[in-house]
Amino acid sequence: QSALTQPASVSGSPGQSITISCTGTSSDVGGYNYVSWYQQHPGKAPKLLIYDVSYRPSGVSNRFSGSKSGNTASLTISGLQAEDETEYYCSLYTSSSSLVFGGGTKLTVL
Amino acid sequence: EVQLLESGGGLVQPGGSLRLSCAASGFTFSSHSMNWVRQTPGKGLEWVSGITINGGKTYYADSVKGRFTISRDNSKSTLYLQMNSLRVEDTAIYYCAKGYRYLDYWGQGTLITVSS
């Protein structure tokens, strides 16, 4: 299973919205609604932000939202805050009962 | 409060073995699939292995298949990862994580360094 493709970095100014993409194929991202997103601050464990493409766990800010179009899933962060500056990963639960992660995206808040 | 506490990390020589443990609390361990995920320092996340609620089915990344074995003891609420024939490229922080389609809770990780 190939890794999912994420941009290495994205940036935005405080208060703006940004979108991080996660591109797969019609056999994985395009075929299943099992995409999740994680936030990881340096030296910390990843934290679940979004599951099943667009569902947000309780306690996660509604500034984080997920969507999918074709073979690309997206994480949108609205009302950017300084604390959002960190690394973000997408993940997919595959048909072979494994998980595959994207390469990660570093978000910089300008 | 859900807690996952990994232990067993350390320095090991190439070709050596190590067993990781993950003690779970704050939820019904026997009702949830569990996983191991690793992260090379400064790099991305790599799923390593997963196990179903009763241990009846186990899954592995190609990179560790045949060398690592995942298991669980529901009576002790503990997840394990037996790692044999360790390679330099297995050096990473190893996290245990709860879930199967997505990982909703993660431990803080334990560092494995494979070096001579």
Image (spheres, coloured by chain):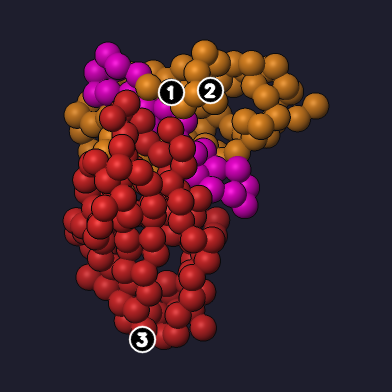
Chain colours: A red, B orange
Q: Residues within 10 Å of mark 1 (few under 14, many from 20)?
A: many
Q: Residue B64 at x, y = what percent?
A: 53, 22
The residue type indicated by label 3 comes to Gly
Please, what secondary structure does the residue beneath circle 1 have? strand
The residue type indicated by label 1 comes to Tyr
Name the mark on residue B60.
1
Q: Are the residues under badges 2 and 1 in a single subunit? A: yes
Q: Residue at x 67, y 24 (%)?
A: B87
Q: Residue B86 at x, y = what percent?
A: 64, 21
Q: Residue at x 30, y 42 (%)?
A: A26
Image: magenta residue range: B34-58
Q: Would you name the residue on which mark 3 appears? A: A15
Residue B72 visible, this angle: no
- Determine the CA span between mark 1 and mark 3: 42 Å
Q: Residue at x 49, y 61 (%)?
A: A7
Q: Are the residues under badges 2 and 3 in a single subunit? A: no
Q: Quadrant of residue A56?
A: bottom left
Q: Are marks 2 and 1 in contact (CB under 8 Å)?
A: yes
